[in-house]
Image (cartoon, rainbow, N blue to C red):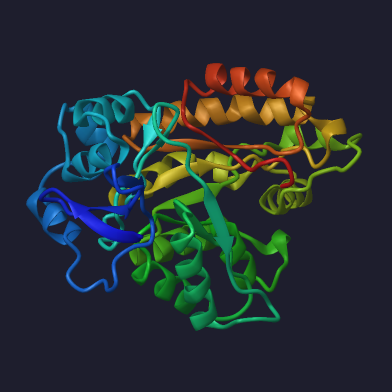
Amino acid sequence: MRRKVYVGPLNVPFAEVDLADDNPPVRLYDTSGPSNFDNPQRLAWLADRADGPVTQLALARQGVITREMEFVAIREGVSAEMVRDEIAAGRAVLPANINHPEVEPMIIGKAFLVKVNANIGTSAVTSDVAEEVEKLTWATKWGADTVMDLSTGPRIHETRESIIRNSAVPIGTVPIYQALEKVNGDPIKLTWEMYRETIIEQAEQGVDYMTVHAGVLLPHVPLAADRVTGIVSRGGSIMAAWCLAHHEENFLYTNFAELCEIFARYDITFSLGDGLRPGSIADANDAAQLAELRTLGELTKIAWEYDVQVMIEGPGHVPMHKIKENVDLQQEWCHEAPFYTLGPLT
């Protein structure tokens, strides 16, 4: 028998499973969310600290244990002090936009349970909002810890709004996808102003973390020229095309400080995208990938100056004997920020 139970005054959800008659039930981590999202308890938590610092990182650095940190500690079976300290050190992130009160706080970092992300989203040929919400429901029912809305085509805003309002897990996006739709799919026509408008739109809706390909620099692009599979990241290829067409540096890199200011206002977590990740094991750990990784480390330190949380997107297509090298370099160059790897097939 399996049932949902809520623990403590913060109503932390668990799945409780009965065992044999002579054994007590076991409690499992649960991501399925509540039956309805009326009056989420996080609204009161946010109201209590409305006049103070916004980001979990800023609060952790001040020694504050937030309700979100307490919630996470119960979920993970650790102390709230440990949660606070890992966030303060940048080794963990708690993605929770102030405009997403429906979220049940969770944490990502090497000191905590492994988390799994699920990708959903409409395309140019299918654009059904209800279907995307159903995908979200099934993903979280079966254990997805975070969900990314990668919608393209029409009704992106409406789709994302429905997903966020019905999600107890953090929702992530890749804002460059929506910005590209605004210029009819032509990356050359992208501008910083258009991108900025897009991230503010998504921030206001409550997106918890955003993948930003700010590490694809103009000098890095030629390093991928001799690859077997070239640049396979969609966001990476968009920014590489823009850089080459304009002979200018990536506008996400040159405007990164302003990005940090916006993210800090909403407590959005950076997922610094690996736009030059390998698309085959032949290209793993090459000069292009590692040059971008160094840049992501530099950007991590800048984001931390603004009290913005950061995780680093990592590659797939890394052969087994190169995985340790890849992780070791990420931990060194990116200052132990969480590594959000895409897995062997992506």
Q: Nearer the viewer, residue 196 or 45?
A: 45
- Tell me: residue 292, above or below residue 37: above
- Tell me: residue 225, above or below residue 329: below
Q: Nearer the viewer, residue 97 or 292?
A: 97
- Tell me: residue 146, above or below residue 327: below
Percent position of residue 159, x then y: 48, 76
Percent position of residue 162, x then y: 41, 75
The answer to whether residue 250 of the structure is visible from this angle is yes
Q: Nearer the viewer, residue 151 or 34?
A: 34
Percent position of residue 36, x then y: 27, 74
Answer left or right for 282 relative to 16. right
Q: Residue at x 72, y 48 (%)?
A: 233
Picture quadrant of residue 291 = top right
Residue extending furthest front?
Answer: 22
Q: What is the count of numbered marks? A: 0
- Tell me: residue 86, above or below residue 264: above
The answer to whether residue 174 of the structure is visible from this angle is no
